[in-house]
Image (cartoon, rainbow, N blue to C red):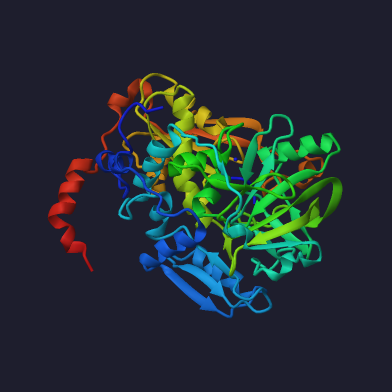
Amino acid sequence: MAKQDSQPDGMSTPLGAGGNGATGASAGIGSNTAPHLAYHDLRRWLEEAEKLGEVKHVKGLSWQKDIGMVSEMAAHTDNAPCFVFEDVPGTLPGSRVLLNFFDGKRKNMTLGFPTDLSKVELSEGFRSHYAADMKRIPPKYVESGPVMQNALTGDAIDITKFPAPQWHAKDGGRYIGTGCYTIIQDPDDGWINCGTYRVMIHDAKSCGLYISPGKQGRQMRDKYKARKQPMPIAVVLGGDPMSFLMGCSEIPQGVSELEVIGGMRGEPVEVIKGPVTGLPIPANAEIVIEGFIEPDKMRIEGPFGEWTGYYATGAAQEPVLDIKAIYHRNEPILLGCVPERPPDEICRYRAIVRSALLRENITKAGVPAVTAAWAHEVGNARLLLAVAIKQRYPGHAKQAGHIATMCHVGAYCGRYTIVVDDDIDVSDLNAVMWALLTRSDPATSIEIIHGAWSTPLDPRIEPERRAVGDYTNSRAVIDACRPFHWMDKFPEVNAPSPEDKALAIHKFGHLFDN
């Protein structure tokens, strides 16, 4: 599972033609609402989710098949509850698996916002209060914490006793690392990076760790390998949800996610100096493993059902994580966030967070009048991007499209970027497709970028190129705006204005109540 890696000119997302998203006025609600994170660890998050009535406890399901089956159902069921699987046969007594944390009202709670905000408002709030300034507070070192309640070393190390499921029928093994993040230190400048990469159990004392080429963790791993040195690593298997979300988001190069999380909380993350690696370990985590990746120690890892909806990489030789210590709380909770065929849970949180970061990237690159951006769930918030602008000059749409496609957030494994006018709700796929079908011309509105950064997880890379390590793809940038030079002559839309639609809902909405 690859890591998921400026105030705009103009109003927030207007209501799209036929769309059901936020209007320009309501989209500002999120940006005007100060967030508050009511939790510092996974247990407090669970308490808050319980208050919302969105948690279901299930006992006795097997890790071999049952939990994976429920996971797939939850991923494709609207407003499914958060599941806590207890008493998993054959695992550590008291240990639990938490699944489907980002859905319902709890997704707003996770980001610290009121539960009545729409997904567009939620993304706008995240952009305004977190992504725009990206305040940073360094972590605070403490002597100990709950994660050290149980410290396993030597013969006591056994990663197989935790309730890591076989998530998909054809996975190559049990994946304990899905809702996880790894902590790695750059050997050159000491920068601490937190990134989400999949972790498969090999045996009691070792795991497989897959990192897609080009990702920040992969760059660091390559540096250690070039030096012929083992790479110290810590894997957080039960962190708080906001920390996990930052671990799988595109944070700028050289910026530590631990500092960003501190900035979001308004206080430093408490960490312990890892006894084995010296890496900062979150004191309130549920489960953490410490160990090393030797430069040339490899073992078959995979296949794994990935975020594209395919077993794209198959089984291959990947580096081995030799576990030197396991730390866990009493009755530990394993956070599961497994990719299914999109749209799934991963799509839901990535769409909120990555859309906010995408808009910031485009605006900070100098593109004016960006009114909205959305990384669509059906493309797992990567393969299909939509950007809305208020056109200012000829070529404005192409500029916005190319920047969105190749900025830090958009560059990895993209496919299509669609630029629309600011009357379109970019989060409404029907509205975006309507604009594409009526305002673009296939012969003149589509530009192709060749040789872009992709991944072995991309199912469309041909076997011949895959065999030689050519993990690149092409991108389509589609201008679905009214043609700038004659947009004043473009036919008018036969839909009510946002104001008239709001009035209609106010006067006649009761007619559509169940």
Image coordinates for residue 299, horizontal then vertical, percent: 83, 55
Q: 279 and 75: which one is in front?
A: 279
In the image shown, does 366 or 149 lie closer to the viewer?
149
Instruction: Residue 410: name its quadrant.
Output: top right
With 34 as the anchor, is 244 left or right in this view?
A: right
456 lies left or right of 107? right
Q: Residue at x 80, y 62 (%)?
A: 154
Q: Does 410 sit left or right of 370 as displayed?
A: right
Q: Residue drawn 41% across and 50% down? A: 37
Visible residue check, residue 231: yes
x then y, percent, for residue 175: 68, 62
* In the foreground, 338 or 132: 132
Q: Is residue 154 above or below residue 261?
A: below
Q: Position of residue 340 (x, y in %)?
A: 58, 60
User: x, y percentage for residue 48?
Assistant: 40, 61
Q: Is residue 253 left or right of residue 482?
A: right
Residue 343 visible in rendering = no
| Quadrant occupied by the C terminus | bottom left
